[in-house]
Amino acid sequence: MSPAARRFILAGATAALAALSAGCATMRVEPWDRDLLAEKKMTFNPLPLERSIDDHIYFSKEGSMGGQDAGGGGCGCN
Amino acid sequence: MTPRLPRIAALLAAALLAAATPHAAFASGAPGPGSPAPRFTLPTRAGTVSLDSLRGEVVLVDFWASWCGPCKSSFPWMRDVYQRYSGKGLTIVAVNLDKSRSSADDFLLDHPSPFTVAFDPSGATAKAYKVWGMPTSFLIGRDGTILLAHSGFDPRRAGEVEAAIQKACSP
């Protein structure tokens, strides 16, 4: 394979990978469409008790809290 | 191939970064103070409401949904403001964006609302106003221009909105 062809394939593969990795990121969920995302079961949190204990430790050590559940909340505000 | 690896890695990193960049600039492009309020005609509990028919009044358009927490706390405030300023020319149109009417109706049973409640399950009005959070409210002056755009509800900051309403209502 000529170097030019290889470069072409490489560029194509990179572009395809970038397009694929964008995935759902290009589709903005509108604030008024977040009703399902706002449900508790949509949070990345299989163990609520453990999470709350961890949060408490984190809060005590770092003086900050929250921000773990990107999918939750749903309002796009506050 | 080996000397090329860093270049490929850099290319990949750049591609990933481009892919991960948020495509939504949130409040950008939303109609702000000074711009004309987008027109709408929507069904209400009793009939329809259109913004054109409210020309000459101060209108607070509030976009809400039953599942949104801050919307719940904004209702008592809107009720209070409505009771105090409706005699001075304020109209509140609370635009519901729920997909199902029944969840909106359930919410309204728990949160009495003496003001106008409109229903826009398609979200077309929210799109026109480029609503960037829930709730988002727009204060529209007597001449149909937007005076204030505000997202979220914080009881500590509600005073600012009320001051704007008071100013808009004063002759």
Image: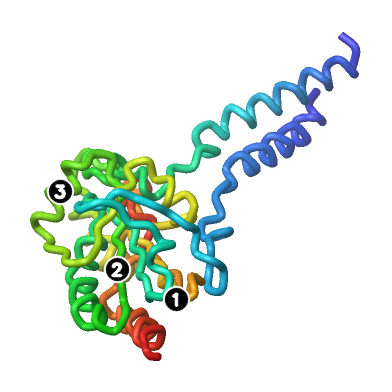
User: Do callouts 1 and 3 point to residues on the same chain?
Assistant: yes
Please give the name of the residue rendered at 25% of the width and 51% of the height, measured from the top-left corner: B47
The label number, if any, that marks residue B105 in the structure image:
3
Query: Can you name the residue that lies furthest to the bottom here?
Result: B171
Frontmost residue, A68 versus B41: B41
As drawn, B75 above or below B100: below
Please give the name of the residue rendered at 30% of the width and 71% of the height, measured from the top-left corner: B91
Mark 2 Cα shell of 10 Å, populated few (<14), some (14-19), many (≥20): many
Q: Quadrant of residue B139?
A: bottom left
Q: Quadrant of residue B171?
A: bottom left
As drawn, B148 above or below A59: below
Looking at the rendered structure, the kind of residue marked 3 is: Asp
Q: CA distance from mark 1 to mark 2?
A: 12 Å
Q: Subunit of mark 2?
A: B
Mark 3 Cα shell of 10 Å, populated few (<14), some (14-19), many (≥20): some
Looking at the rendered structure, the kind of residue marked 2 is: Ile
Mark 1 Cα shell of 10 Å, populated few (<14), some (14-19), many (≥20): many
Looking at the rendered structure, the kind of residue marked 1 is: Gly
Circle 2 sits in a helix, a strand or a loop, which is it?
strand
> Between disc 1 and disc 3, whose residue precedes?
3
Contact check, label 3 and label 2, Cβ < 8 Å: no
Image coordinates for residue B82, horizontal then vertical, percent: 23, 75
Is the C terminus of chain A in the top left, top right, bottom left or bottom right quadrant? bottom left
Image coordinates for residue B99, horizontal then vertical, percent: 28, 40
